[in-house]
Amino acid sequence: MQPLILLACSFAFIIVQLDVTIVNVALPEIGRELQAGVSQLQWVVDAYTLGFAVFLLSAGAVGDRFGSRAVFLGGFALFTLASLACAVAPDALTLNLARAVQGIGAALLVPSSLAILNAVYAGDRKMLAKAIAWWTAAGGVSIAAGPVLGGVLMSAFGWRSIFWVNIPVCAIGFWLTLRVVPAIRHHGPARHFDLPGQVLAIIALTAFIGAVIEVHALGLTHMAVIGAFIVALVAGVLFVLVERRSKAPMLPLRLFKLNGFTPAVLFGVFVNFAYYGVIFILSFYLQTVRGFSVLHAGLIFLPLTGTFLFANIASGWLQARVGSRQPMIIGGLIGASGYALLAVFGISDSAGFWAMLPGLALIPAGMGLAVPAMTTAILASVERSQGGTASAVLNTARQVGGAMGVAVYGALVATPATAAILSGIHIALGVSTALLLGGALLAVSSNFNQGEKLCHS
């Protein structure tokens, strides 16, 4: 029964991660049909990641109150309805609102799926590490396969098909969950829904990401941009104050004092900032600068898929022997090498696929090694009853990092000039290289001993 439960949880992560990247190759066509500019197209990606990020922490509290299985099923249902709304959206605003609701559905799915795995494999930390590696592998392959699948679907059926495909996948996940996943409830006292913290988190993150997106179009000195940054700062400060004083905060700040917790979270932010941002701008580069068809552009991303799978599996094997630190260090260094090779050899107005291949293969190989180890380190650093909250904090930080990556890197290429686009991509890849090197240094200097002992226990 355990493998089927893992399969049900993996279905959820597949659909959540797939919708992060499947839209990237569709953005130029969406822009043409819905008459949307670059900033609106950035929101097609970021509305989803923001909806995901700002409701993740509250989703953990909802799971504690109503049970992980019930919330898991609710996430599948909401994701299905939002995908339907995306598929029939008549304009960019409707599409972006539906994407935000999709993100909320994703927020219900991810913490509950990890809470289910944490409960099912509670007696065997080695098996938990392996299960998380397989769960991460499923999401890693889907996030890498997104551009490829998007290219195939769009070339045959148009951009709306990338949302229609979610419906049968969600239906299978829903049915499998009903059949094999037991009712799992939090054994401690249920946490309260932190409404003030939730509202402040939404305001702070939306204002900040919106300001970053609009900087290129409006300018840094525009009153709307300045005002959004001020709102984000004020709401962010208020959020921290509210969480510090709350008896049941959505973000327990004490978690950040635990050994290895903060470095692992920062590592996740660096990884997602680099990866989400680079995938976004590469899609524009391939179709706008190089003039490739949507199918050709999607197929170029194919190397991302295979190395994710093998690296995720290798990560579970490696963690069981040496703990979390080494896979994070090695993964960070491999990922940094991939971004650097792509910058030096893979991006120009004439570079071919073989010049891009080493970078495209190494980037997911590094992520595939590091991300499962990072997730295991987070879960191993907290009490079992806090597993859902800890995973929600990690995934919230990662989604915020991804949204920021799309906003910042998107601004670098929001220009019709080919030379400026190429320059922006090289800057982005240089930043990504530095971020992955920084993540590796964080792992070197951090204390993951507790997580390593738990992996061996």
Image (spheres, rainbow, N blue to C red):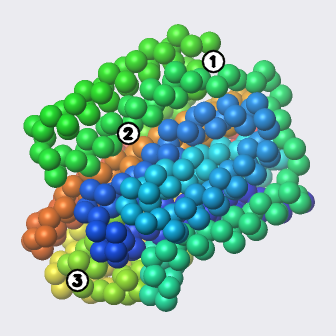
Q: Horizontal placement of 239 versus 432: left or right?
A: right
Q: Decide: marks 2, 3 in contact (CB < 8 A)?
A: no
How would you rate the neighbour count of disc 3 (Cα within 10 Å): few for under 14, some for 14-19, many for 20 or more? some
In the rendered view of the protein, which quadrant contains the C terminus? Answer: top right
Chain-order first, disc 2 or disc 3: 2
Residue assigned mark 1: 248
**Is residue 119 shown above or below 332?**
above
Q: Position of residue 244 (x, y in %)?
A: 50, 14
Q: Nearer the viewer, mark 1 or mark 2?
A: 2
Q: Which mark is residue 32?
A: none
Q: Nearer the viewer, mark 2 or mark 3?
A: 2
For mark 2, give the secondary structure. helix
**Is residue 438 shown above or below 133?**
above
Residue assigned mark 3: 290
Mark-to-mark CA distance, 2 and 3: 33 Å
Q: Quadrant of residue 416?
A: bottom left
